[in-house]
Image (cartoon, grey):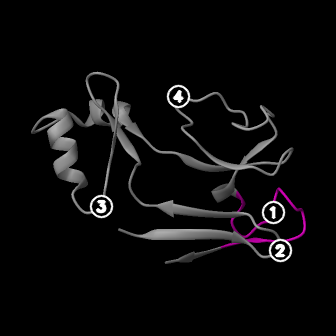
Amino acid sequence: MQIVEARCTHCELTAVLPSIPDFVIDDNGKYIPLKYPGERQILEDVLGEGYDPKSLAERLVTYIPMACAACKTQFGLDIKRDVPKCSQCGSEDIYIITQHIEKTCPICNIGVIKSKVM
């Protein structure tokens, strides 16, 4: 599993980006954490052996690392299911941190978001 860290060169903005989704949703709507190693076995336990790839895509949850320009909060957002606003202050002035790699930080507007493989 590859893990990437994104960090601003000026402020405290930091995100860790795993290469696998965070959760799979079971038949009862419960979020089951996917852990590495062993994520394939967890998927088979939840979805059954030989699960359908289309149903898999609908049931995977990946929290995208976000940052709020209004209150400087960092949080995860499931962009398929969650309302696109800050979980702390409710602002819609939020940014996907990974879309700013090698660009000016959307929070401090001074530093640059750099990434590295951990």
Residue 105 in the magenta stretch? The answer is yes
| Left or right for 116, reference 85 | left
Of residues 70 and 48, the one drawn nearer to the viewer in this rendering: 70
What is the spatial separation of the Cα atoms under label 1 and label 2, in whole angstroms?
Answer: 8 Å
Residue 10's tag is 2
- Residue 106: image x %, image y %? 82, 56
Q: What residue is disc 3 on?
A: 36
Q: What residue is disc 1 on?
A: 105
Residue name at image x 52 percent, y 32 percent: 80
Highlighted magenta segment, given as a residue range:
100-114
Residue kind at label 4, given as amino acid type: Arg
Q: Main secondary structure of the magenta part?
A: loop
Residue 81's tag is 4
Between discs 3 and 4, the one toward the N terminus = 3
Residue name at image x 40 percent, y 49 percent: 21
Secondary structure type for disc 1: loop
Residue kind at label 2, given as amino acid type: His
Residue kind at label 1, given as amino acid type: Cys
